[in-house]
Structure formats: structure tokens, C-alpha cells
Amino acid sequence: MILNVWTEFAVCFVLIAYAGTKLSLYGDVIADKTGLSGNWIGLIMLATATSLPELITGLSSVALAEVPNVAVGNILGACVFNLTFLVIIDFLHRKESIYRRASQGHVLSAGFCVIMIGLVGFNVLLGQRNGWAIGHVGIYSPVIVLLYVIAMRSIFLYEKQQMIEYAEDVTDRYADLSLRRAIVGYGLAVVVVVIAGVRMPFIATELSSTMGWHTSFVGTLLVPVVTSMPELSVTLGALRIGALDMAIANLLGSNLFNIVIVAIDDLLYQPGPLLSYVSVIHGASAMSAVIMTGLTIVGILYRPQTRVLKTVGWISLGLFTIYLLNSTVLYLYEE
């Protein structure tokens, strides 16, 4: 029984890793053929595809299992994990710090991340005292959706202006691949990532029962790790082909879309505003994600050159420290 579960886990992991690499490649081809930036492709196409496991997990948690803590814990935990992946790509990018190469356009999407994650954290900390609702839906949900639309429009207009300014530098780097083939390949890779990624949370649940792990650990730490595997795979795939901006945009875009999932889950959760029925401990994850996003903004604007013991920059070290602190708080104060 244990062997079967771990085997299924390994198979899904391999599928996600392979499809994630293809997703990054074909996403870069589409960006090259259409004139769209890697930032925009990563922010919209890749981020939406890789966040589908979080969406499915959230929907099943509130609509079927009625465990709002798992839904919110998974989303906020995934936001923290996505930012922690920046530490990994900073370590793997040996030429120089990723913050020296990253486009400053990421500051715009990171800024919206701070606003949206902060809004969720604020309402989590209000707890049972939050009575602001439209029917059973919290007033924060339509605000989240509106902020996401504004963010996408603002980033699109910014990237469009950037592409106009540097249009003369654009060259066809994938002459042997047609746009049609890239779109088909991208679609097939999305299907594989979605199928394997959606299955992953259920495998995690089976592992928890098989291994005797506490459900709180599964909801706040294990499930986010599992549902974030597509983001990690796509990010590493983008880094492998040299599409650094696409890798960073995928992580920030996934966090933006993850917060929209809170609004979707809130719509389906019938007892009342979703964030009024979860533990305030999730506020720690929200604040951790806000601090980590702030560190990312500092890194992109300051562009530090030094690395700690030739490993990662001090920004990445700060990100990893906040991740450890958040994990410790969740472990010590689990409910």
C-alpha cells in the first residue's frame, strides 16, 4: 500500500517535471513569435496553468470536504513556497544574482501581490469579527477580483510600452518552430500538468493517512508543497532555457492568481465569508508572503551583487529565513 502511494507520487512528479519544461519552452516560443514579453507570458499563461491544482484543491476543500482551513492554508502556503523558489533559482543561476538580471517590470506585479495578499491577511486577522459581507460572500472577494483585473491591465500596458521601445531588438530565436506547433505543444503540456497536478493533492492526503501524519501538517505544509510542484517545474524549465524573466513572472503571477482563488472559494463556501471561518494562524502565512514579496521588490530595485559564501544573495537568504520562521510558527501553533 505504502509503495503504491509513493510510486504514484513519483510518477506524477516526473510527469509534472517533464511537462513543465515543455511548458516553459513553448511559452518562450509563443512570446518570441507573437512579440509578447516573457514577463507577460509567465504572468498569465504559465501562472494560470500551474495554479490550477491550487484551484481544484480549494474548490474540493470548501464545496465537498467543507474544510476551509485546508483551502486557505493551501493558498497562502503556496504563496510562501512560490517566493521560496526564488532562492532555488538564485542558487542555480551561477553567473550572477537573479536580481541583477530581472526586469524592473516585476516590481509592478510584486506590488499588486503585496496589496492583494495583505488584504487577505487583514481579513484573516479580523476573524469572527468580520461581518462585512454580500450574502454569504465576504466584501473582500469582489475587491480581490477587481484588483486582479486592474493588475493584469496595468501590467499589460506597461509590458506593451516596453516592447514598443525595444521592438528593434526583437529577433526570431525559434525559426525552426512554428507558432501553431508551439500552441499545440503548449496545450498538450498544460493538459499533462493539470492532470498530474490535480491528482497530487489527493496523493498527499493518502500519504498523510498511510504515514500517520497530522492533518494540520498536511493542510498547511505538505499540500502547498505538492500543489506548487508545477510552479517549480515550470520555473526551473524557464531558467534552463535562459528565460529568467518568465521564471520570476510565473511565480509572482501564480501568487496573484492564488489570491483570486480565495474569492472563488468564498463564493462556493455557503456558511458565510470564508475568511471568517478559518484560523487566525493563517495570518502568519499571509504576512510572511507580504514580507517576502517586499524583499523581492528590494532585490529587483537595489540589484545586490554580493553572494553569501558564494551561494545566494542576502535577499534570497532573507527569503529562506522568513520561510523557516513561517514553518516554525505553523508547526508550534497548529490548530
Image (cartoon, rainbow, N blue to C red):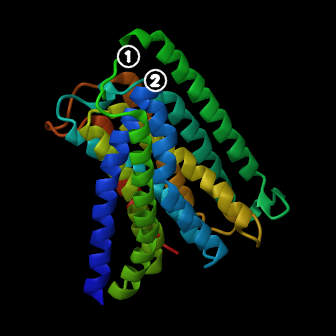
The furthest residue to the right:
135
The furthest residue to the left:
309
Looking at this view, is 327 or 116 the one in front?
116
Q: Is residue 161 left or right of residue 302?
A: right
Amino acid type, residue under disc 1 in the picture = Val
Q: Quadrant of the N terminus?
A: bottom left
Q: Residue at x 62, y 27 (%)?
A: 154
The mark nearer the N terminus, 1 or 2, is: 2
Does residue 254 appear anywhere in the picture? Answer: no
Q: Residue at x 37, y 46 (%)?
A: 23
Residue 166, position as x, y percentages in the image:
43, 12
Q: Residue at x 34, y 51 (%)?
A: 20
Structural crowding at the residue carrying mark 1, measured as other residues with C-alpha within 10 Å and reported as few (<14), some (14–19) or many (≥20): few
* Residue marked by disc 1: 170
Residue 88, position as x, y percentages in the image:
27, 46
Q: Which image quadrant for residue 244?
A: top left
Amino acid type, residue under disc 2 in the picture = Gly
Looking at this view, is 96 or 309 the one in front?
96
State how far apart marks 1 and 2 are (Cα). 8 Å
Label 1–label 2 contact, CB within 8 A: yes
Residue 144, position as x, y percentages in the image:
68, 46
* Residue marked by disc 2: 35
Local secondary structure at mark 2: loop
